[in-house]
Image: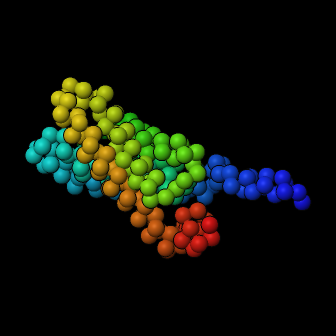
């Protein structure tokens, strides 16, 4: 075998596989539904916290919003295929809306904005880099996505100071309560063996 053939084979093996498997679809669906139920609980707990913190300093309520951004970073970090962040976040938002929350159908639009935000970092890196840093940035950008959606659906009428505070608090909350949380949740799931058919599980075993 020639050196060129070996090099070509190595390049092909290093190339990400963007094709979704049945196990990817099923796992993404399970994640979306599970995160959706987390949202249902957080709609009550986080919703009350949001109003309390926001009353102290308008815009600071974003500090508790990060849990609502969890689906995107978690789905992207586990599935590692294009569209995974959007798929899981929107499905979770759908579960939240169907069970019932204070925002109704607009939850889906917000979920889409958050999912797109969470997806961006992996898209920019051509779905080749999945680690603590990228999943944290994914959570941060999910928060920026939520902020952008809300900016054009009502927050433009609010003060500049409010929107700056809300952007920063949303981004920080997304980085920690969505990105960092997604990273450790994935590690915990991988430790049980539940992710052995995914790169996240093989990383734990040192197979890749």
Residue 71 drawn at (x, y percent)? 42, 51
Q: For the C terminus, which image quadrant? A: bottom right
* Quadrant of the rendered image containing residue 205: bottom right
Residue 24 pos. (x, y %): 58, 55
Q: What's the colour scheme?
A: rainbow
Q: Residue at x 72, y 56 (%)?
A: 13
Quarter of the view holding residue 113: top left
| Residue 31 on image: x %, y % | 46, 57
Q: Residue furthest top?
A: 157
Among the 4 quarters of the image, the one containing residue 182: bottom left
Residue extending farthest to the left is 56
Q: Nearer the viewer, residue 124 or 50?
A: 124
Quarter of the rendering occupied by the N terminus? bottom right
* Residue 149 shown left or right of residue 112 in the figure: left
- Whether residue 105 is visible here, answered yes or no, is no
Residue at 68%, 55% (x, y): give it: 14
Tell me if 19 is positioned left or right of 187 in this view: right
């Amino acid at each position: 075998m020639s050196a060129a053939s070996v090099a070509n084979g190595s390049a092909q093996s290093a190339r990400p596989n963007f094709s979704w498997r049945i196990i990817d679809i099923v796992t993404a669906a399970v994640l979306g539904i599970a995160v959706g139920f987390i949202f249902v609980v957080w709609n009550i707990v986080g919703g009350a916290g949001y109003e309390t913190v926001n009353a102290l300093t308008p815009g600071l309520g974003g500090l508790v919003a990060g849990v609502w951004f969890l689906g995107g970073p978690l789905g992207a970090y586990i599935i590692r295929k294009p569209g995974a962040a959007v798929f899981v976040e929107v499905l979770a938002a759908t579960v939240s809306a169907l069970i019932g929350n204070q925002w109704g159908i607009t939850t889906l639009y917000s979920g889409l904005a958050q999912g797109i935000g969470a997806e961006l970092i992996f898209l920019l890196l051509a779905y080749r880099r999945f680690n603590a840093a990228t999943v944290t940035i994914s959570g941060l950008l999910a928060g920026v996505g939520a902020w952008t959606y809300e900016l054009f659906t009502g927050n433009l009428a609010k003060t500049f100071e409010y929107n700056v505070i809300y952007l920063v608090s949303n981004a920080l909350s997304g980085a920690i309560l969505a990105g960092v949380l997604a990273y450790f949740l994935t590690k915990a799931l991988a430790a049980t063996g539940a992710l052995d058919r995914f790169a996240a599980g093989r990383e734990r075993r040192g197979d890749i």
